[in-house]
Amino acid sequence: MTDTAAEAWQHWTESRSAAVSAPHGPLALTGTHWLEPEPAKLPGLPGTWWVESGTVCAELAAGDGVRLEGEQREATGRVALRPDTDPGAQIAVLDGLRLVPIEREGELALRVFDPAAPRRASFAGISVFPYAPDWAVPAVFAPFEDGVQALMVENADGRARPLTVAGRIAFTLAGQAHTLTVSGSDGPGGQLSGVIADSTSGRETYRFRFVTLPAPDADGNTVLDLNRAYLPPCAFSDHFICPFPPPGNRLTVAVEAGERHVVTV
């Protein structure tokens, strides 16, 4: 017997809480350190760190305790780590910390995930609106005639960065027609995703949310299920650089569906 839509949604909400509160999940992020070509010390970490030839580099001494994930021996001397955008991405570990090199628009940083992070310790769940089937509506995707575009969008850290978008979806909510600009996954048959706000944003809900849609069929048909509108990573840690909604992605209706806020104790 397959789950009903409501039961599947309940499983989704439970898996979301488990994922964000995992030992090295979003709540554990305690720092995103943007690096320069000149070696520098990073707060709470041994050695010196810098960028070189598209990698995150460190100079480490015996006894520093840094290892490459999956290896038993300590890393010493000059270590070069490939970032998350590289197919051969590498991660370092230090005691319980996870050190993750990232690349964003040509800039490299080191992220530090700490299972003992205060935000993780105080997490008590994600508040959600009750499931309501009326918030799952048919949508039609229309790709941009000129292909994907890069829109400059402000990010949660106050900087504007390009957001790659593939087209728009059209749908109807409460008898009103709407469109949203969305991004597409790499490759054919990929899912769509969007950054949205609505009249609940910043009050009943976090200031913006993310949505994911199933891959559209040959005619562009897909489904926008706002019951699964979810909080961006920056709702769980201030050290994420989530994009704000692009122009036109603020809905005039109150979307009383999906995730609302992080609950703490």
Image (cartoon, rainbow, N blue to C red):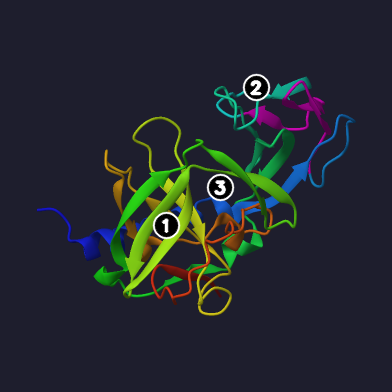
Please tell me which residue is depicted at 39% across the width and 46% down the height of the picture: 142
Q: Is residue 77 above or below residue 174?
A: above
Task: Choose the circle earlier in sequence order: 3 or 1.
Answer: 1
Q: Earlier in the sequence, mark 1 or mark 2?
A: 1
Rendering coords of residue 112 (x, y %): 68, 45
Write down the quadrant of residue 229 in the picture: bottom left
Q: Which residue is mark 1?
A: 16
Of 127 and 186, the residue lying toward us: 186
Q: Which residue is mark 2?
A: 73
Kind of residue at badge 3: His
100 lies left or right of 217: right
Asked if residue 190 lies left or right of residue 77, the reply is left
The earlier-in-sequence mark between 3 and 2 is 3
- Answer with left or right where residue 133 lies relative to residue 261: left
Query: Please, what secondary structure does the residue beneath circle 3 have?
Result: loop
Q: Looking at this view, is 115 or 258 the one in front?
A: 258
The answer to whether residue 76 shows anywhere in this view is no
- Span highlighted in magenta in the image: 45-68
Residue 22 position, x and y percent, is 49, 52
Return the residue at label 3: 24
